[in-house]
Image (tube, helix red, strand yellow):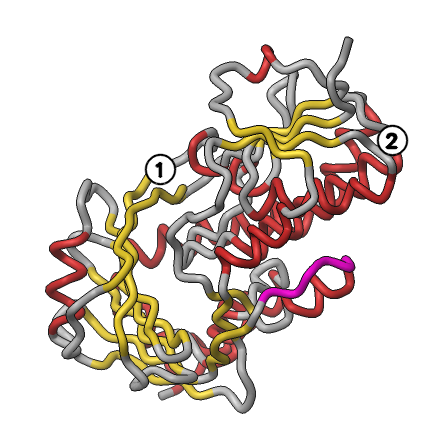
Amino acid sequence: MESADVAVVGAGVAGSVLARLLEPSGYRVVLYDMFRRYRKPCGEVIPAAALDMVASLRLPVPDVVDKIRFFEFIDERGRTLREVEFSKPIWVSIDKTEWVNELREGLSLEIRTVRKLTDIEAGLVVDARGPFSSLGLKVTVWRGYVHSRDYVEKAVIIISREPFGIAWVFGHGDLANVGGGFIGVGDPRPLVYGMLRRLGLWNFLEKAYSIVTLYPRIILSDGYSLRVGESAGFIQSLGGEGIRPAIESAAALAYAIEENGAKISRGLLEAYDRYTRGLQTETKLANILLALSQAMGASALSIVGEEFLSLWLSGRLREVRRVLAALFTVKRRRGQG
């Protein structure tokens, strides 16, 4: 006998949002996770517009601890490459840990390690294990906090050419969220420490590691289960943004299930594919742009304008025509100069 209509393996953003969205429909949903309390290290920033999306889904809105409209891009030696100021906040820094734990409250959550999804008895199994089941290049990321009010409303992104990767400092209220990761580097902490100390930052708090997927492959189903969030490949390689794509893909799958039922079927897969077309486009374009950035390094920042940066930072890379137009316009102007 099936123990649930829907079993969601992984109670992070994607899994918890999906469970919350399916709950009002009367489905018996069970979340599986290794830990009672959620705590995955990350930068904790999302596009400001994502707050409206969360509210429209009738989900608890995360607490905002900072609004970010100043961006500074620097190289690994601390030299400024580019500064951009937007008229209004384009990012918000949230308390992600408390938000996900709030999403989990009241849901049926089983604390266990699931080795084989085929061992789960349910009408529909959803893989929401993030980087632990996604396909792509795995990069180790280190994250910490530091007491500093110097980064209120500000984000600093440090671009490293060799090894290729980024470190960051994001405003987070009375703290700054700091961290970084680099392709091919198993322990990024020493490199991040060196870069941040050039900015006068040390005495880091709540230090932790995680992994992210770069150049992800999009896989909506493995034949037995459906995938959502980073597990499905929905993470923006260009910068590692994963929270918003997790929310969007969870909402897309919830809509598909409501229309087609909680069983794998052709109709369910086609609906899920249709509802995630924008995310798929964004993921593929971000992979291409990341490859170009890896080849060009920090010089890539010198050929893109504020229009492109706005589209990228606000999570709108799926607007392909606007993205290409922004790049073309900059190239043409440079040629005229």
Amino acid type, mark 1? Leu
Residue 137's mark?
A: 1
Disc 2 target residue: 260
In this view, 241 is above or below 221: below
- From the viewer's perspective, is 26 left or right of 167? right
Q: Residues within 10 Å of mark 2 (few under 14, many from 20)?
A: some
**Residue lying at the far top of the rendered structure:** 1
Between 117 and 303, the residue placed more toward the observer is 117
Query: For the N terminus, which image quadrant?
Result: top right
Query: How far across and how far down the image is residue 218, in percent?
Result: 55, 36
Q: Is residue 101 magenta?
A: no
Magenta stretch prevailing secondary structure: loop
Between 130 and 279, the residue placed more toward the observer is 130
Query: How far across and how far down the image is residue 238, in percent?
Result: 42, 57
Q: Is residue 59 magenta?
A: yes
Query: For the C terminus, which image quadrant?
Result: bottom left
- Residue at screen point 12% across, 55% down: 190
Pointers 2 and 1 in contact (CB under 8 A)? no
Mark 2 falls on what kind of element?
helix
Amino acid type, mark 2? Asn
Between 320 and 141, the residue placed more toward the observer is 141
- Residue at screen point 69% across, 40% down: 107
- In the rendered image, is residue 307 in sight? yes
Query: How far across and how far down the image is residue 51, in percent?
Result: 65, 68
Separation of residues labelled 2 and 1 (CA atoms): 33 Å
- In the rendered image, is residue 295 in sight? no
Looking at the rendering, which quadrant does residue 18 occupy? top right
Region of the chain picked out in magenta, as a range:
57-62
- From the viewer's perspective, is 31 left or right of 150? right
